């Protein structure tokens, strides 16, 4: 009902916090509480049409200045007016608007600007400290409900010193290449852009890895961290993108780590002298038990660092899924740091080297040396990854120098990985291209998919394909390799099929090679099964048969065949496994 006239206003005043307090006011009656500086109006009796007997508080400027936020007086109900029941007995569960808004917080509330020129270091660190290190948020009791998500809106945030991140931080950017942390350090230029710190840290006093064991070991590790949707740019190229000091059980997703490397493809590896502090991700351990473990890196792209990932310590069970590693001197060092120092088993945290590291569905592109170099550690696996222009000093197939994967220790795995070097197996026009293997050292390599070739009538041994020899880490031919080649030959003109297993071994040190072929036959004329034969020979760097002539050296294994079935032509389909 619209109010058309107010004939009388009765006003009382008194003390709200004395005696029985504020009495029930009559309908339309107003009261001013002198002690609390509050104004009320009575809603009257239900019999007079009021929905309920009540004293309604009237907001005043005094209320706003005293409480500082009008949102504290307003309520929010999820899908109010719908059929959704949020409370007990069919009722509703109201929240203060302020409480609802506080479920998420952005860095803007702490003063970030994000224009690429204002220094946002202090504001971002303040947000992290207050949300995750401030006593109520850091303590065990009741802390979980206070650990909200810090959102960093799209923009470029200039960072001039390291950001220190403790346990249980959840940071969400607007997306990689939308939320950009541009790290341009003004002091301590070798310090990382982001460093994860243990629970002994306090505001303004990040605790180093060396304090972790004394602080409680595994109970004080940085853990439960989630960072998504950001780009970190290292503009000087003198430091790491992220330094993980014994981080466990954390998730890093949709992140770009960008260094400043502009590597000249024509520059020989021997003259390349970058800053060895330039590492995309470096991982450390306090001990073999208190280490970087059970972390997931998903859709993380690392580019333009000297080394893209490096660790020589006892990291355990870390997984890289659908990541991309591009433009670097080397891709991943396991058991080796960026300065070339190997795992030292007499040092705490370096007893075993990296173990159970997985690279799944990852891409390695434009990397001068190895994509993955396991100097120490076991049970590391590279599965279903792709390698393009790796180990070629930037020059592609013309200048292959290094194996794409090198396992210095046994017990590591490479499964179903694709390499652009695969074309060198069958393309006879590229016999002058040096064929350095996909994998060398100690391990097994399985070919990607199957390879199809055509066999025709030939009574003298004819080139079919080639396979790589064993090499050292630097690409020099040395040692032995064994192949198990599974093939199926289907004759298109004589109606028969032959399935075989070729066992082949080659030793470039003693210049010996041996091949055996065990097969079964299906067709009308079994005699034809004996008319196809294979042999293995060494090839030199030009693709010619090795004869031991001066200046020649074995550089690959050539597979030759004869097919004495008159007018025969068919398809040979094969795959192989190499054991180094």
Image (spheres, rainbow, N blue to C red):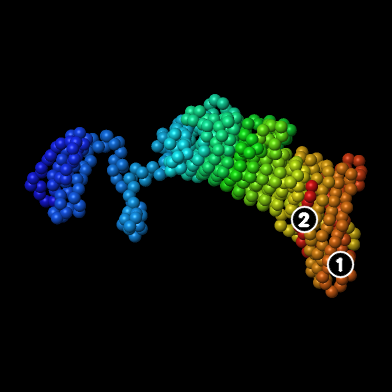
> Which is more toward the observer, 66 or 345?
345
Question: Is 560 rendered above or below residue 145?
Answer: below
The location of residue 107, given as percent across then percent down, is 43, 38
Disc 2 to disc 1, how far (Cα)?
A: 22 Å
Whether residue 413 is visible to the viewer of this picture, yes or no, is yes
Secondary structure type for disc 2 = strand
Q: Residue furthest top?
A: 187
Residue lying at 40% horizontally and 44% vertically, measured from the top left: 103
Q: Residue furthest front?
A: 19
- Disc 2 crowd, CA 10 A, few/some/many (<14, 14-19, 20+): many
The location of residue 484, given as percent across then percent down, is 80, 55
Q: Which mark is residue 462?
A: none
**Residue behind mark 1:** 529
> Which is more toward the observer, 183 or 188?
188
The location of residue 376, given as percent across then percent down, is 72, 39
- Left or right of 192, for residue 350: right
**Residue behind mark 2:** 576
- Disc 1 crowd, CA 10 A, few/some/many (<14, 14-19, 20+): many
- Left or right of 423, for residue 152: left
- The quadrant holding residue 252 is top right
Tell which circle, 2 or 1, labels the residue nearer the N-terminal end. 1
Residue lying at 85% horizontally and 56% vertically, measured from the top left: 560
Labelled pair 2, 1 in contact (Cβ < 8 Å): no
The location of residue 83, given as percent across then percent down, is 34, 60
Residue lying at 60% horizontally and 44% vertically, measured from the top left: 294
> Which is more toward the observer, 254 or 546?
254
Secondary structure type for disc 1 = helix
> Which is more toward the observer, 377 or 276?
377
Question: Is 308 rendered above or below residue 558?
Answer: above
Residue lying at 19% horizontally and 45% vertically, measured from the top left: 55
Question: Is 449 rendered above or below residue 373?
Answer: below
């Amino acid at each position: 009902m619209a109010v058309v006239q107010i004939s009388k206003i009765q006003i009382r005043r008194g003390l709200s916090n004395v005696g029985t307090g504020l009495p029930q006011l009559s309908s339309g009656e107003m009261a001013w509480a002198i002690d609390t500086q509050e104004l009320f109006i009575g809603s009257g009796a239900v019999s007079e049409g009021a929905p309920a007997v009540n004293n309604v508080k009237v907001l005043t400027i005094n209320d706003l200045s005293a409480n500082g936020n009008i949102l504290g007086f307003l309520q929010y109900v999820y899908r109010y007016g719908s059929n959704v029941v949020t409370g007990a007995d069919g009722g509703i569960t109201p929240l203060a608007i302020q409480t609802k808004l506080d479920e998420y917080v952005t860095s803007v509330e702490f003063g970030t600007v994000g224009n690429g020129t204002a220094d946002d270091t202090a504001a971002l660190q303040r947000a992290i400290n207050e949300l995750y290190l401030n006593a109520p948020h850091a303590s065990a009791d009741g802390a979980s409900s206070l650990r909200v998500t810090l959102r960093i809106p799209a923009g470029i945030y200039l960072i001039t010193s390291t950001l220190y991140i403790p346990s249980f931080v959840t940071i969400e950017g607007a997306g990689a290449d939308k939320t950009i942390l541009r790290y341009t350090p003004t002091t301590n230029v070798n310090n990382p852009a982001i460093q994860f710190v243990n629970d002994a840290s306090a505001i303004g006093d990040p605790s180093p890895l060396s304090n972790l064991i004394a602080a409680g070991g595994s109970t004080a590790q940085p853990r439960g961290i989630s960072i998504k949707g950001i780009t970190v740019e290292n503009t000087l190229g003198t430091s790491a993108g992220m330094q993980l000091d014994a981080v466990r059980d954390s998730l890093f997703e949709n992140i770009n780590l960008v260094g400043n490397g502009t590597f000249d493809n024509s520059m020989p590896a021997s003259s390349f002298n970058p800053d060895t502090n330039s590492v995309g991700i470096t991982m450390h351990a306090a001990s073999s038990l208190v280490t970087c473990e059970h972390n997931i890196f998903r859709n993380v792209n690392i580019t333009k660092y000297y080394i893209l990932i490096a660790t020589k310590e006892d990291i355990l069970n870390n997984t890289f899924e659908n990541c991309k590693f591009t433009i670097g001197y080397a891709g991943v060092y396991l058991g080796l740091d960026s300065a070339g120092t190997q795992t030292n088993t007499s040092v705490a945290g370096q007893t075993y080297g990296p173990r159970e590291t997985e690279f799944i569905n990852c891409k390695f592109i434009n990397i001068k040396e190895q994509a993955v170099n396991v100097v120490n550690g076991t049970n590391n696996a590279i599965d279903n990854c792709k390698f393009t222009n790796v180990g070629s000093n930037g020059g592609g197939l013309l200048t292959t120098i290094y194996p794409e994967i090198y396992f210095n220790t046994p017990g590591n795995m490479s499964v179903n990985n694709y390499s652009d070097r695969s074309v060198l197996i069958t393309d006879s026009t590229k016999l002058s291209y040096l064929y350095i293997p996909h994998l060398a050292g100690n391990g097994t390599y399985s070919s990607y998919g199957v390879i199809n070739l055509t066999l025709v009538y030939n009574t003298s041994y004819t080139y079919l394909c080639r396979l790589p020899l064993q090499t050292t880490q630097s690409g020099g031919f040395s040692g032995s390799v064994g192949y198990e080649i599974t093939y199926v030959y289907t004759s298109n003109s004589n109606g028969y099929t032959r399935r075989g297993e070729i066992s082949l071994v080659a030793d470039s040190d003693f210049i010996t090679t041996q091949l055996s072929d065990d097969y079964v036959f299906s067709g009308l004329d079994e005699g034809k099964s004996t008319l196809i034969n294979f042999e293995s020979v060494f090839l030199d760097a030009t693709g010619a048969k090795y004869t031991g002539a001066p200046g020649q050296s074995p550089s690959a294994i050539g597979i030759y065949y004869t097919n004495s079935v008159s007018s025969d032509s068919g398809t040979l389909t094969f795959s192989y496994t190499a054991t180094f």
